[in-house]
Image: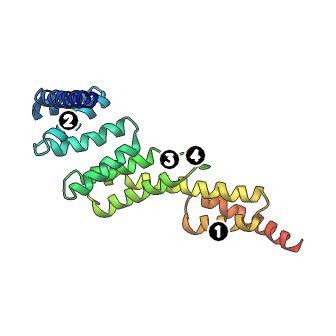
Amino acid sequence: MRTIICLICLAFLVSGCALFDSSRRMEKTADQLAADGASAFMNEKYRAAITEYTDLKDWYPFSRYAILAELKIADAHFQLKEYDQAIAAYDQFERMHPRNEAVPYVINQIGLCWFNQMDTVDRDITPAKNAMAQFKRLMEQFPDSEYAQEAPERIQACIDKIAGHELYVAKFYMKTGQYHAGLKRLEYIVEFYPGTEQSETALNLIPECAALAEDTEKE
């Protein structure tokens, strides 16, 4: 008997949820959801914007606003500094709409997601490497895009960050008496990051590091 009662209650609960979802679904048209999403985004209520645009995308997947909703969801995550979610949303947009006119913008945004996560030179430089890869891709695929104009400057910032990390590691090796490893790092910087401040510093350190490495061999 208890089992029957539980099943009846469950049935009412499920049907109630369905009715609630259905009524909620009928509350707003695609136009209204698009307008409310835009209003929320404009007023920097990004969490609310995500809700409105997600409903728009899910409830009206074939509306003229659906593609815009996908993009604005990614933008809202970006504004909230939820970069992992933003990258995932931008990636999905590009995969689903590879020929959309917004693709250059999307690639730039993915690059900025990584760029904004760059930390000090003693930390992981994966964000710098990933950002540089995206900005290079933007320049290669869409060289005439307005978003490609700032890419060279950002690429240089990424290079400086990566070279700075390499120099940090080289100096660490020198401080800890690992002169051969330090020398290799310094030579790597000079070879792969010419023209940077880090390269100049590395050039100045190489003679000292090489001499110390030679001395350790004599001991």
Label 2, label 4: how many angstroms apart (C-alpha)?
Answer: 39 Å
Q: Is residue 75 left or right of residue 133?
A: left
Residue lying farthest to the front in this orientation: 1
- Amino acid at pointer 3: Met
Give the CA separation, mark 2 to mark 1.
Answer: 55 Å
Question: Which is in the foreground here, disc 3 or disc 2?
Answer: 2
Circle 3 sits on which residue? 118
Amino acid type, residue under disc 2 in the picture:
Asp
**Disc 4 element:** loop
Disc nearest the viewer among 2 and 4: 2
Query: Residue 25, image x and y in percent?
Result: 14, 31
Residue that label 2 marks: 55
Say if mark 4 contacts mark 1, CB within 8 Å: no
Residue 146 shows in the view: no
Q: Distance between the Cα atoms at labels 4 and 3?
A: 7 Å
Could you tell me which secondary element the residue under label 2 belongs to? helix
The three-letter amino acid code for the residue at tag 4 is Thr
For disc 2, the neighbor class at 10 Å (few under 14, some 14 to 19, many from 20) is many
Structural crowding at the residue carrying mark 1, measured as other residues with C-alpha within 10 Å and reported as few (<14), some (14–19) or many (≥20): some
Q: Nearer the viewer, mark 4 or mark 1?
A: 4
Q: Is residue 141 above or below residue 217?
A: above
In the image, what residue occupies the spot 31% across and 30% down? 47
Decide: is 126 above or below 17. Answer: below
Q: Which of marks 2 and 1 is nearer the N terminus?
A: 2
Number of residues whose C-alpha sits closer than 10 Å to that of mark 4, classed few (under 14), some (14–19) or many (20 or more)? few
With 112 as the anchor, is 194 left or right in this view? right
Q: In which quarter of the image is the N terminus?
A: top left
Q: Give amino acid for label 1.
A: Glu
Between disc 3 and disc 2, whose residue precedes?
A: 2
Name the residue beneath numbered marker 4: 120
- For mark 3, does the 10 Å Cα neighbourhood hold few (<14), some (14 to 19), or many (20 or more) residues? many
Residue drawn at point x = 26 percent, y = 55 percent: 94
